[in-house]
Image (cartoon, rainbow, N blue to C red):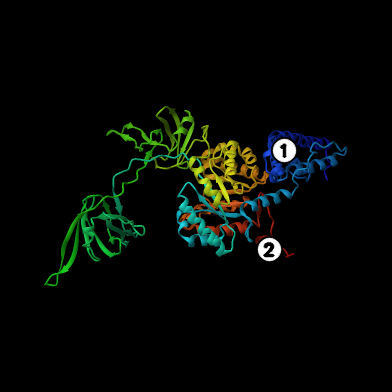
Amino acid sequence: MQELDKDELRKLWQQIAEICRDMKQVESSLLKRSDGIHKTHLRSARNLAHYLALRKHDIRGMQAELARLGLSSLGRTESHVLDALQSVEHVLSKLIGDDPPSSCDGEPGVLMGEGAELIEKNTEALFGSAPASRKVRIMVTMASDAATDYELVRDLVASGMDCMRINCAHDGPDVWMGMIQNLQRARQEAGRNCRLLMDIAGPKLRTGAIEPGPAVVKCRPQRDVYGRVTAAARIWITSEERPESAPTNVGATLQFPASFLGKMRAGDGLRFRDARKAGRSLRITHANDHGYWAEARQTIYFVPGIEVELTRNARAPSNARRTRILAKARIGKLPATAQTLLLKQGETLLLTRANEPGKPTAYSKSGQIVSPAQISVTLPQMLDHAKPGEPIWFDDGKIGGVIRAVNADYVSVEITQAREKGEKLGAEKGINLPETQIDIPALTDEDIAALPFIVEHADLIGYSFVRSEADVCQLLERLEQLKGQHLGLILKIETRKGFENLPRLILAAMRTESLGIMIARGDLAVECGYQRLAEVQEEMLWICEAAHVPVIWATQVLENLAKKGIPSRSEVTDAAMGERAECVMLNKGPYTVNAVRVLADILKRMQAHQEKKRAMLRPLRLAASFGPAN
């Protein structure tokens, strides 16, 4: 065995001592107002301060030396920092031999193993008991259908949903109540615990409305690769006087006068020329109490005002068929086409403060830009904080730009990132200003109005757009006024500012007994840059483990599976990474029930291999055939 160099050992000991001294200073500074922290979290707050002090140092060289000595390299100390350092310092002291005084003495920290117990205890306080087969919980965002489709909620609970999420940015109390009642019924039927999270939206900066396009509806049948019709397009026909929505999705809905509909019957035809003057026809297949169904076997472009002939085949005395025209009418109003703005690199987009419909770029006959595209924003007061040179992103980062000018009426943006042929920007698309210092409250009037309902019905409250300690305190004070201290608090970290302030946000939230952090990876990718996302989410996992705070792994988990029924390979790997969190969130989609089942199976399998950052060495099938079995 190589002889130990006392000078090297003493150098390592001094590095440990320096870190311990920093821990005491950071703890004193960060926790000087610790009287507001709930007693449940006092030791966790100290451990967080210790971890922040440790990570101020670059200890990579020291880690290599400690590992060479067979000592802890401090790579798994998040949940018990002081105890780990004290253990290493003690061994180094014995190896040095002259027993130098400890710099890590003082009030004992969280012990090794105890940190994991605290995280588990806090997770259970937030989400309830873990299911028998796995430790990581599954959260699912509800679609509006969950208010009326009990079978959907029942199947989600039975398949493994541990927490229902209601996004209060959508629907309203009547719909929310329908979801809650279905959840209560499903809990009883399945005999499973399932918590309820209600997520307040916060201020959302989005694009405004765009002026509507022409009222044109394109309808086409399904065809095979040879162009042969495999399924006719379905058309719903209703009266102008009392229009009824189609019972199911259709290719088009047409309105006619009730007197015209009164002459129809199954087997009749409708004959006309469409918007392109192409001769077209429909066949009436059947009727119900509210209208008629028709089929089209050709592609048709409908516009209002097209004259339509109602025809019926009849047999002449010669037994030949002849077509009679029974009546004529014109197609009534049709919905306007939703427009988008086509934005190309180098072009300008004006974000207007006035609440006026957006307009696309106008070009001259020679192709020169006459006027740039423009669109309003949902929160014009946010534009007050923008400055020239700051980046701006639209629609989850699909379109990027740089602010070039800010004035009283609009903000001028140069488009710097879009596909070569341009990118389409629609209404109600998200806007991110990652470097803009936005100074508006995270709690909106709509959020405040929803709080009494949430306090009465929810187990947990989700807080969006949270960026500062003041944001956290504002919500906690509101909840205290409403006697809502029983609610678990989930801070949704979705901005660069929220990420940078994460330790302070956690300490502010420790005023309440139960809290968690949601990593909103979609918004964070836009705010911090996609190339930094892996690093950002890793840092958040470390900080939350040091504070013994449960983490929710969110955004686009098994997205293809939930929406299309088939997962991609990369998203299965991503879902497996969710084992490092305490909860994984799925978004709504037509195949969400199956996505819950698949995710539950992935998490169950992965917990045998991984616990937070620690690899779990269960027996491997690949190794079983090598050598005799034990």
Vertical side of 443 occupied by 403: above or below: above
The crowding category of the residue bearing disc 1, from other C-alpha atoms within 10 Å (few below 14, some 14 to 19, many at least 20), is few
Q: Do the residues labelled 2 and 1 touch (CB within 8 Å)?
A: no
Looking at this view, is 86 or 285 the one in front? 285
The crowding category of the residue bearing disc 2, from other C-alpha atoms within 10 Å (few below 14, some 14 to 19, many at least 20), is few
Q: Position of residue 254 (x, y in %)?
A: 27, 55
- Residue at the limit of the structure toward the left, as seen here: 317
Q: Where is residue 627 in the image (x, y as percent from the top left)?
A: 72, 63
Which of the two discs, 2 and 1, labels the residue nearer the N terminus?
1
The image quarter containing residue 417 is top left
In the image: residue 141, left or right of residue 230: right
Please, what is the three-letter code of the amino acid marked with disc 1?
Gly
Mark nearest the camera among 2 and 1 is 1
Residue at 69 percent across and 56 percent down: it is 617
Q: Could one spot residue 470 in this view of the protein? A: yes
- Residue at the limit of the structure toward the right, as seen here: 98
User: How many dots with numbers?
Assistant: 2
- Label for residue 61? 1
Residue at 73 percent across and 65 percent down: it is 629
Q: Tell me the residue that label 2 is attached to.
A: 624
How far apart in space, not on screen, are marks 2 and 1 (Cα)? 37 Å
